[in-house]
């Protein structure tokens, strides 16, 4: 079972990204519910923020790949 | 007229005489001809090199030795990791289908700069070998291909039939002591980039021409109608929103960036496509260009903020290094983000398809295909999203470098206020 520690690392990185993107999505939903007319603006910023979080998570995945 | 100039002039005249569609066909066929100059064979390798069959019978390669020991119990077990890496990494030939000796691939030119000068040959001369067993002799120099890296061949083969000196260090990692020539080969990624450049040039020159003939005020037609919203989106939503009044100067760069990344992302999604945007060298070059554009255009306030940040003087030894590192981390993050997103997507898709071969059951295939399709659709979104994010963040960095900071004065006021209260 070589590389299992790296797999755990990748898993931990994914947990972090999951929490982050979950928060972003949840709060964006709240924001849209409060101000439906600002939906498109909220959506773009949400996607950008999600991509940034995902990018950080992928750093973890890359490091796990390189091990 | 110089004969060379004359030929160019002749081609120019010829191209000018054609209408657009035949021109496109002409350029395409020129490209295909250039491709096929080196590809003396676009066929399965029927006459297999003797050494290869011998070698595959004994053992794959030195580095695979450990793997094949593990797989000794299950002889025909598929190594998905190896397949996945074969798909995401660059190679000297454009592999289409088939395994090892039955592989069908488009040979690409191998261009090497050795001590004796330039050496050019077709990658088909390696006979699909990536284990260093097939020696190609050119200009009195001998080369082998080991895991898509070209080495000078050793005089005699080792016990695995490889013309390489492989030694194991104390960490049991293979170290190859053979020298390497400088490799300027048209690899799969480079060929894919040429194709995307060709697509971009043909597409956007025809769109630009349409604007020239019909004007910017008339309704767009055909390709124009698809690309106009994207161009306007980059100009207004990305450039103008993030850079401000000086945005027009940077719109050409941002448009190039956006469409270059987008089209390469989409080409990578196609069957047989190369994983170009998931290549770290490619993303490195793009982010270095962003680094240069940002810093060359940085105004006084940008540099002032770097070297004299609005903070107490005793913090400068900490803040200035942080600010300087910050210059590099921003493009570095751009580089890793694009590379990791695209590579991860490709690995996920190949792994999901690979589930069928791991479980060897028909029951798994519907689930695996459905998931792969889902991820494929998601990757289409990611292709757009990553092109957008890269362009948007580039615009943001440029914007922070060229903008007139009004907050600066607010910081100064804070500082004065703090100084007064103490």
Image: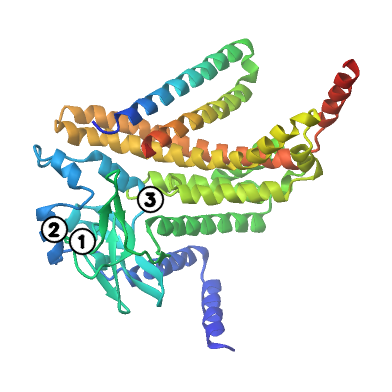
Dot 2 crowding, Cα within 10 Å, few <14, some 14–19, many 20+ = some
Mark 1 and mark 2 residues within 8 Å of each other at the beta carbon = yes
Question: Residue at 64% across / 38% down in the picture?
Answer: B326
Q: Nearer the viewer, mark 2 or mark 3?
A: 2
Q: Which mark is residue B162?
A: 1
- Chain holding disc 1: B
Q: Residues within 10 Å of mark 3 (few under 14, many from 20)?
A: many
Whichever of callouts 2 and 3 sits on the residue coming sooner in the sequence is: 2
From this viewpoint, which residue is outermost toward the right?
B420
Q: Chain of mark 2?
A: B
Residue B53: image quadrant is bottom left
Q: Label 2: which residue? A: B55
Label 2, secondary structure: give it: helix
Sequence-first tag of 3 and 1: 1
Q: Residue at x 9, y 54 (%)?
A: B57
At label 1, counting other C-alpha atoms closer than 10 Å, the crowd grade (few under 14, some 14-19, many 20 or more) is many
Q: Name the spot of residue A5 as percent of width and height, x first.
A: 33, 28
Q: Nearer the viewer, residue B293 or A2?
A: A2
Looking at the image, residue B90 sits to the left or right of residue A56; the answer is left
Percent position of residue B230, x then y = 58, 42
User: Can residue B3 be seen by looking at this rendering?
Assistant: yes
| Mark 1 and mark 2: Cα distance apart in space | 9 Å
Could you say whether the residue bearing mark 1 is in a helix, strand or loop?
loop
Q: How is the image coloured?
A: rainbow
Is B29 in front, or is B258?
Answer: B258
* x 22%, y 29%: residue: B366
């Amino acid at each position: 079972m070589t590389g299992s520690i790296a797999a755990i690392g990748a898993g931990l990185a994914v947990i972090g990204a999951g929490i982050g993107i979950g928060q972003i999505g949840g709060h964006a939903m709240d924001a849209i519910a409060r101000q439906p007319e600002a939906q498109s603006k909220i959506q773009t910023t949400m996607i950008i923020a999600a991509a940034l979080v995902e990018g950080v998570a992928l750093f973890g995945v890359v490091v796990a790949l390189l091990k | 007229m110089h004969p060379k100039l004359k030929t160019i002039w002749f081609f120019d005249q010829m191209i000018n005489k054609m209408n657009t569609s035949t021109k496109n066909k002409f350029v395409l066929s020129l490209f295909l001809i250039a491709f096929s100059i080196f590809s003396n064979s676009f066929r399965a390798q029927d006459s297999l090199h003797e050494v290869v069959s011998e070698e595959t019978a004994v053992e794959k390669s030195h580095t695979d030795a450990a793997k094949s020991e593990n797989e000794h119990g299950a002889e025909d077990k598929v190594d998905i990791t190896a397949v996945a890496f074969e798909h995401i990494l660059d190679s000297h030939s454009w592999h289409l289908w088939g395994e090892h000796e039955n592989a069908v691939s488009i040979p690409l030119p191998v261009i090497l700069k050795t001590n004796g000068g330039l050496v050019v040959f077709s990658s088909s001369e390696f006979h699909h070998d990536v284990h260093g067993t097939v020696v190609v002799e050119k200009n009195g120099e001998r080369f082998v291909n080991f895991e898509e890296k070209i080495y000078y061949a050793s005089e005699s083969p080792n016990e695995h039939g490889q013309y390489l000196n492989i030694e194991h260090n104390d960490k049991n990692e293979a170290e190859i002591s053979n020298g390497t020539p400088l490799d300027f080969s048209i690899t799969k990624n480079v060929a894919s980039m040429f194709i995307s450049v060709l697509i971009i040039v043909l597409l956007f020159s025809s769109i630009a021409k349409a604007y020239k003939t019909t004007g910017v005020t008339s309704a767009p037609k055909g390709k124009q109608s698809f690309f106009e919203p994207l161009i306007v989106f980059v100009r207004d939503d990305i450039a103008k929103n993030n850079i401000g009044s000086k945005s027009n100067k940077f719109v050409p760069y941002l448009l190039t960036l956006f469409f270059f990344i987008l089209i390469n992302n989409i080409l990578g999604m196609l069957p047989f496509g190369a994983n170009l945007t998931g290549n770290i060298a490619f993303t490195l070059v793009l982010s270095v260009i962003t680094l240069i554009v940002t810093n060359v255009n940085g105004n006084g306030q940008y540099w002032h903020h770097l070297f004299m940040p609005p903070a107490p003087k005793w913090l400068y030894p900490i803040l200035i290094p942080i600010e300087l590192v910050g210059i590099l981390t921003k493009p570095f993050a751009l580089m890793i983000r694009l590379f990791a997103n695209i590579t991860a997507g490709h690995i996920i898709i190949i792994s999901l398809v690979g589930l069928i071969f791991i479980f060897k059951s028909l029951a798994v295939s519907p689930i695996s295909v459905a998931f792969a399709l889902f991820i494929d659709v998601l990757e289409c979104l990611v292709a757009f999203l990553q092109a957008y994010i890269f362009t948007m963040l580039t615009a943001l960095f440029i914007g922070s470098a060229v903008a007139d900071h009004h907050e600066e004065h607010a910081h100064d006021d804070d500082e004065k206020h703090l100084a007064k209260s103490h």
